[in-house]
Image (cartoon, rainbow, N blue to C red):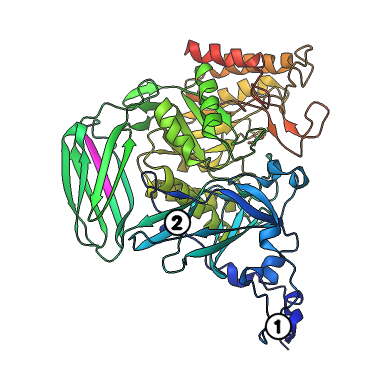
Amino acid sequence: MMQQKAGNFTQNIHDEEYEKKFLSGMASPCGMINDTARQKESLNGLWNFQIDQYDTCIRSKWYEESYKNDKGRYQPIDYSFDSWQTIRVPSCWNTEDERFYYYEGPAVYTRKFRYENRGEQRVFIKFGAVNYEAKVFLNKKFVEMHRGGSTPFYLEVTGLLEEMNRILVVADNTRKAEAVPAKNTDWFNYGGIYRDVEIIRLPETFIQDYSVGLVPGTGFQQIKAEIVVNGTQTDGEAMLEIAEFGIQQKLSLKNGKADVILNASPELWSPENPRLYEVKITYMADSVTEQIGFREIQTSGTKVFLNGKQIFLKGICAHEESVPNGKAVTDEEIRENFRLAKEMNCNFMRLAHYPHTEKAAQIADQMGIMLWEEIPVYWAIDFANPQTYENAENQLTELILRDRNRASVIIWSVGNENADTDERLQFMSSLAVKAKQLDNSRLVSAACLVDHTKLMIADRLAAYLDIIGINEYYGWYAPDFNELIQLLDNSNPQKPVVITEFGADALKGARGTADDMGTEDCQLDIFRKQTETLGNIPYIQGTSPWILFDFRCPRRTSALQGEYNRKGLLNEDITYKKPAFEVMKKFYESL
Ligand code: GCU
């Protein structure tokens, strides 16, 4: 017999199904807005904040602010929004208050804000990212939920805003077996609203999305523009202007969409010449203008070609982290990491293992660094779970829709280091196909594992990839370096291989012999052997050693690690270069 729900006021302590109604309204990729060129008003700043380990805000509906019962009498409450402590938005609660350094679970953010209509017909609130799941309430009502800790989501709040408003967000960074990533990773699980929160005011019908880029395989002589508008006026005429090409092209929309292919011979974007063009799109009362670079990335056989010229991807991996800010990295910190990569003679960076802020690709466009961007399908994912797949595909779609106008992004990666099982093959090959469907102008890859028993590159996922990423730690986790030489000799991939990880831990300043693990000398010896070996394999067309800088990792607790992963070529506050930095710098200089 169905358990009778308790009818009295203690309902909320007997209902363990309380979350269900919030888990259906998922903010999905089709609600995204290409806002790169948009005017936005910040809701950043000090928000009231409270960790909420028992998820009581949701259980007891704090967001309804029902201070009185239905007889008009005040009733006991367990919250005082305006007298809670405050926390900076954007930030990670872990680095804002040492009491929350290790906190994992739900936490409540809330603030009030004024709104006055300035003639716009539609209003949206954008969250740059919330790790990991966000439930958003506005003026006591649930708006939507978003799942996925590194991609933006947009909530339409047209008609919900008053002169004075309260927004409330329950951010929950609980690690879950069915999530993406799952419970076990090798990085710090930051929590919170760690990217910007902004208001976007738009006309009734607006330019929701657009992509402008070279048409692959047309000798860099054709560009394609696609436009999507949102609103009631979906069959009008849009205008595409690229003044430097003398382009003023009308596009007739049908059901809110239009695309056009035009002849143009742009100066091509490259790391050496990060050339950007002003692109303007107008539709009715709306227009967007942004800087876009034009380039072509292709593979042929085991080679990689940028703008028709064979290249070697001289890379380095990086997490999205800084000591003071955790994942809430600043533009300056991003620029410094890119500058260090360039100092190492890199032309490429692998932004591991999840989508970094969109500002990274925007800055890479300007500074001239090619990027590998990745979704956190990392290690042991619940590959047999359809909801897990939907989550992964949502994150992939949100990443691609967010960054597909960024010339610097050349590779979409569908994951990292997953065991080659049938369920994983089905899951990740579907993601690879989805990435190609969404964007056929970029390469699709993943960081795969080698087959240590056959001693060869033999991951079945490779059939669905343009570039085979390979993580190998010969000299470190796999002590016998000669196996790497055998493995590379045994393998005969028909596509380019990028060694997406190799490396070794080294504590800053720790010295010893090449056999003393954890010393700079051991790391140096492994980097020397790796580069001497990898540089002579014809099908290896890139390397991105693990990793630019030491990073927080609570599962790394040895004396040398101190809860950091010490494989960085710099220490965690990027004030010190370990000797292996020079090995990579010289290796890339020699190519
Ligand atoms: C793995 C993994 C990284 C991890 C690294 C390590 O390859 O991809 O996320 O940090 O190895 O063990 O240091």
Q: Residue furthest right?
A: 559
Residue 389 x/y as whole percent? 54, 56
Residue 68 x/y as whole percent? 68, 79
Residue 554 x/y as whole percent? 76, 39
Compared to residue 107, the image places residue 489 above or below, namely: above
Residue 268 x/y as whole percent? 29, 27
Is the shortest distance between ligand 1 and the CB of mark 1 under 8 Å?
no
Q: Does the stretch in magenta take in 33?
A: no
- Identify which residue, 377 or 300, lies in the foreground: 377
User: Does the CB distance between marks 1 and 2 fall below 8 Å?
Assistant: no
Query: Disc 1 marks which residue?
Result: 73
User: Residue placed at 53% from the left, 30% from the top?
Assistant: 332
- Mark 1: amino acid: Arg
Number of the label disc, if any, that sits on residue 236: none
Earlier-in-chain disc, 1 versus 2: 2
Position of the N terminus, as image quadrant, is bottom right
User: Residue placed at 72% from the left, 59% from the top?
Assistant: 52
- Mark 2: amino acid: Pro
- Identify which residue, 562 or 72, lies in the foreground: 72
Is residue 216 visible to the viewer in this orientation of the structure? yes
Q: CA distance from mark 1 to mark 2?
A: 44 Å
Compared to residue 277, the image places residue 82 above or below, namely: below
In this image, 291 relative to 333: left or right?
left
Q: Residues within 10 Å of mark 2 (few under 14, many from 20)?
A: many
Q: Which residues are magenta?
A: 221-226
Q: Residues within 10 Å of mark 1 (few under 14, many from 20)?
A: few
Looking at the rendered structure, the secondary structure element under dot 2 is: helix
Is the shortest distance between ligand 1 and the CB of mark 2 under 8 Å?
no
Query: Disc 2 marks which residue?
Result: 29
Is residue 494 visible to the viewer in this orientation of the structure? no
In front: mark 1 or mark 2?
1
